[in-house]
Every structure is written in structure tokens, then in C-alpha cells.
Image: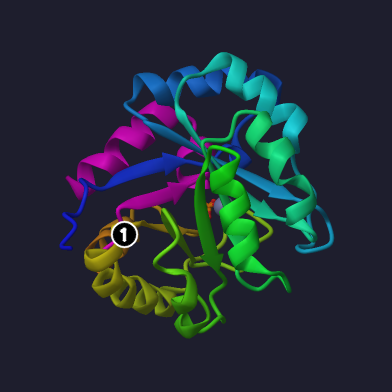
Amino acid sequence: MNHKKPIPQVVPSLLSADFTRLKDCIRIVEKAGAQRLHLDVMDGHFVPNITIGPFIIEAIRRTTTLHLETHLMITNADRFLKQFVDAGSDTVIIHVESDRALHTDLRAIKELGAKAGLVLNPQTEFEKVEPYLDEIDHLLVMTVNPGFGGQQMIVGALEKVRRAQVWQERYGFLIEVDGGVNQETIALAASAGADLLVAGYAVFGTGRPGHALRSLNWQIK
Ligand code: DX5
Ligand code: ZN
């Protein structure tokens, strides 16, 4: 089956938001046209940083109807899938590098009622995700090493976005790019074939997040 590509859009990542005024930050990007929010969960073990968990996601869920995509950068993700879906995640994305029975985890996410995504790091070869492409809703290609916002894009990783498009035509999953998307790099990432472009620092690291989001979106439409 030949799946059509959706219109590309920027997905704000709350990682660089001001957490003392999270609700305001969400309102600003909602008004600027965001349809989804990217939530970065880190455990200080799988990546060298710690961020938010289900408790905060549940609070975010109460303040917005936007599609919440939860990017899990944690060890033993399988133990927490239910908590993250129950907290209100619409999509749950797990790393292919985790030493796990991924078919089981992807199936578990879908059985819990969420969309299932797989993510691969910049150094990870595309072949690693190939066995799963017929069962995912979402493929996330990291263009920085996960752990921190505001890093520079590793442009070479975009090659995997180009490769993913061939499979996307057959299976219809969304392709997203995560890391270093900004006013200078967004056109490049979109032209590689990304449908969704995560932007953290380039939105919330600026003094005017609404304006920044509109201007990023304007570049790819
Ligand atoms: C990094 C996270 C990203 C991060 C991107 O580990 O997965 O989602 O928020 O931040 P920027 O857009 O600042 O590179
Ligand atoms: Zn992320």
C-alpha cells in the first residue's frame, strides 16, 4: 500500500521550557499552532541526565488536549509503559538500543491504547530498526546524542530519514527528527523527509517561543 506523506510540522519539546510556568508555555505554543508536544523522559542511567516522569506528564495532560508524544530515555522501559500511557501519553517512543524484547514492548504499548514509536541514536545503524518497521506508528531519528537540549545537529544522521521514507510508503509510520532543529537546520531536516521536527531550545530557549514556532513552521510549509 502506498501511504501519502503528511504535511510537516514542528513539535515543541518542553525540555527547554520554563517549568515554573509550564501551563503558560503550553498555551503559547498551542496558540502558535502546535498540534503535538514532545516530552523527554530521562532516568540518569540510560542517558546522563534526569528529567520528568509520569507525575508531571499527568499534570501536562490535565492542561492540554494536544497529542503527547513521550520519548523514553530510560532503562527497563517495559516496567513503566503502563504508567506512561495511564499518565496520558498518546504516543510512547522507546529506544532500539535498549537490550529488550522490543516486539513485546511495542505490542504492549499498543495494547495499552497508545501509538508505538521506536527511536535510534545517531550512531545506531538503520538496519537495527528494520525488523520492527511494519509494527510501529512512529520512527524517531536522533540527530544529537540524547540527554540534553540545545546541542548541534549531527547532519549525517539525516541519511536514515531518507532511507526510512522507502519503508514509510509501504507501512505508513510517521518520521520524526529530534535534536538541533533550529532556524538554520530545519529546512535541511524537512527536505530529508521528516514529517515531524522536534524543536526544544529553538522554541523555548528564545525570548518569544510563539514567534519562534511560527517562524520554524513557516520555513517548512
Ligand atoms: C534530547 C531530547 C530532545 C531535546 C531536543 O535528548 O531527546 O527531544 O528536547 O532539544 P533541542 O531541540 O534543543 O536540540
Ligand atoms: Zn526527545
Counting from the top left corner in percent of width and height, residue 107 is at 57, 55
Task: Classify residue 28 as left or right of residue 109.
Answer: left
Compared to residue 21, the image places residue 86 above or below, namely below
Residue 212: percent from the left, percent from the top? 37, 36
Q: Residue at x 44, y 78 (%)?
A: 130
Whether 148 is drawn above or below 86: the answer is: below
Under tag 1, what secondary structure?
Answer: loop
Q: Which residue is mark 1?
A: 194
Image quadrant containing the N terminus: bottom left
For residue 164, what is the image quadrant?
bottom left
Q: For residue 203: magenta?
A: yes
Task: Name the spot of residue 219 as percent of width and height, x first.
Answer: 22, 47
Question: Where does the C terminus fall, quadrant-wise?
Answer: top left
Q: Is 150 inside the magenta-drawn segment?
A: no
The stretch in magenta equals: 193-221
Compared with 6, 154 (above or below) is below
The part of the image, by quadrant, that contains residue 105 is bottom right
Q: Dot 1 surroundings within 10 Å: few (below 14), some, or many (20 or more)?
A: many
Instruction: State the image coordinates of residue 216 (x, y, percent, origin top left).
Output: 31, 43
Nearest the camera: 177 or 172? 172
- Report the amino acid beneath label 1: Ala
Question: Which one is nearer the viewer's eye here, 12 or 20?
Answer: 12
**Residue at x-position 64% and y-position 19%:** 21
Residue lying at the far right of the rendered structure: 45
- Who's the residue at 27% across and 69% down the image? 165
